[in-house]
């Protein structure tokens, strides 16, 4: 009886490992096809110069398909309009441009990086960032 239980447990463990390997391989293949890797040279217009010289700059690093990143889209559009001519609001899709994510050392998306008018990084935020939080950061940097 003990031998039967041991054999059954070993067989169950083997089946679980095989299923996990198959699911893992599937998820990796889905991720690779859903997150296209494009070189910056293929789409240079999508990667802005960061920071904008002489201007307070907010850079949002995210992806057009990530849920919190999608939530940032209307916020970014509003901030672009509200601060037009006074601060730059930029976006880079790190799923389309993975080198940019590495370049800025991000570990989660969305990530917002703030630069002062001299081009020095002065702050970072990871995750969804609401309008009031962005306004407060711009005010701290002297943009009203």
Image (spheres, rainbow, N blue to C red):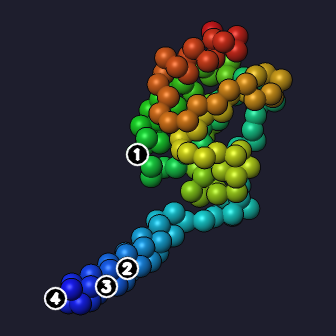
Q: Secondary structure at mark 3?
A: helix
Q: Nearer the viewer, mark 2 or mark 3?
A: 3
Circle number at residue 1: 4
Q: If you read the primary sequence from the N terminus, does the residue marked by circle 4 or circle 2 appear first? A: 4
Q: Nearer the viewer, mark 3 or mark 1?
A: 3
Query: Where is the C terminus found, in terms of image quarters?
Result: top right
User: Which residue is label 2 attached to?
Assistant: 17
Q: Is residue 104 above or below residue 87?
A: below
Name the residue: 75% across, 29% down. Answer: 121
Apparent side of residue 31 relative to residue 45 in the rendered image (left or right):
left
**Which one is in front, 39 or 25?**
25
Q: If you read the primary sequence from the N terminus, does the residue marked by circle 3 or circle 1 appear first? A: 3
Distance from disc 2 to disc 3, alpha carbons, whole Å, reads 11 Å
Distance from disc 4 to disc 2, alpha carbons, whole Å, reads 25 Å
Q: If you read the primary sequence from the N terminus, does the residue marked by circle 1 or circle 2 appear first? A: 2
Distance from disc 4 to disc 3, alpha carbons, whole Å, reads 14 Å
**Residue 35, percent from left and from top:** 51, 63
| Label 1: how many Cα within 10 Å (few below 14, some 14–19, many 20+) | few
Query: Where is the N terminus found, in terms of image quarters?
Result: bottom left
Q: Nearer the viewer, mark 4 or mark 1?
A: 4
């Amino acid at each position: 009886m003990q031998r039967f239980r041991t054999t059954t447990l070993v067989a169950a463990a083997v089946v679980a490992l095989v299923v996990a390997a198959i699911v893992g391989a599937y998820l990796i293949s889905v991720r690779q096809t859903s997150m296209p890797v494009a070189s910056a040279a293929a789409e240079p217009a999508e990667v802005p110069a960061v920071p904008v010289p002489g201007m307070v700059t907010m850079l949002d690093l995210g992806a057009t398909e990530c849920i919190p990143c999608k939530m940032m889209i209307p916020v970014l559009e509003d901030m672009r309009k509200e601060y037009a001519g006074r601060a730059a609001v930029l976006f880079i899709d790190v799923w389309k441009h993975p080198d940019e994510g590495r370049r800025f050392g991000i570990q989660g998306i969305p990530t917002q990086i703030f630069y002062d008018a001299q081009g020095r990084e002065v702050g970072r935020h990871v995750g969804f960032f609401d309008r009031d939080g962005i306004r407060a950061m711009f005010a701290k940097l002297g943009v009203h």
